[in-house]
Amino acid sequence: MYPRSSPKEIVFAVGTFLVFVGLVGLVALGQAKLGTTTEGTLQILFSTSLIVGTITHLAGFISLSGRWRRPAAQTGNPGGFPWFSVAAVVLWIIILPFALLRAYAYVHRH
């Protein structure tokens, strides 16, 4: 991160961190055998971290996407409609969750 991060960058970074904590925690919890109360509590904690992190990550990504747009003169469009930003949002919102669910189903099939 830059020395002076904007609030939008901080939201994006916190969301990314929470997503990774949730994913790593759930994967590690699936490998460990703990007591029933502890395991259920940790699963709820990591799942909540994953859900809140995903929402925060997407909110930060969408708020930062305005900074990554190219000017209209470079795209050739008078309105400057950023088709690549729409494609990136579609990938993050639609395709990535399905890929993660498919990987999760594959890992827990056996």
Image (cartoon, rainbow, N blue to C red):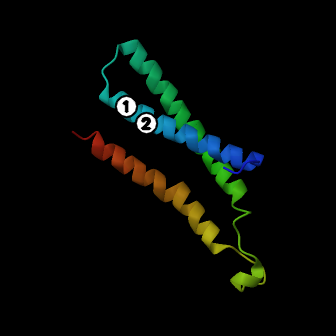
Q: Residue at x 72, y 83 (%)?
A: 74
| Residue for badge 1 | 28
* Residue 59 on image: x %, y %: 67, 49
Q: Residue at x 74, y 63 (%)?
A: 67
Q: Residue at x 63, y 67 (%)?
A: 85
Answer with left or right where residue 23 lies relative to residue 68.
left
Seen in the picture, residue 41 relative to 29 is either above or below; the reply is: above
* Residue 37 on image: x %, y %: 41, 13
- Label drawn at residue 24: 2
* Residue 79 on image: x %, y %: 78, 79
For the residues marked 2 and 1, what is the alpha-carbon distance in whole angstroms?
A: 6 Å
Answer with left or right where residue 2 lies relative to residue 101.
right
Seen in the picture, residue 24 relative to 39 is either above or below; the reply is: below
Kindly indicate whether the residue at mark 1 contacts the one at mark 2 (C-beta within 8 angstroms). Answer: yes
Number of numbered callouts drawn: 2
Q: Badge 1, how many Cα within 10 Å: few under 14, some, many 20+?
A: few
- Label drawn at residue 53: none
Q: Quadrant of residue 29?
A: top left
The amino acid type found where label 2 is placed reads Val
Q: Quadrant of residue 38?
A: top left
What kind of element bears circle 1?
helix
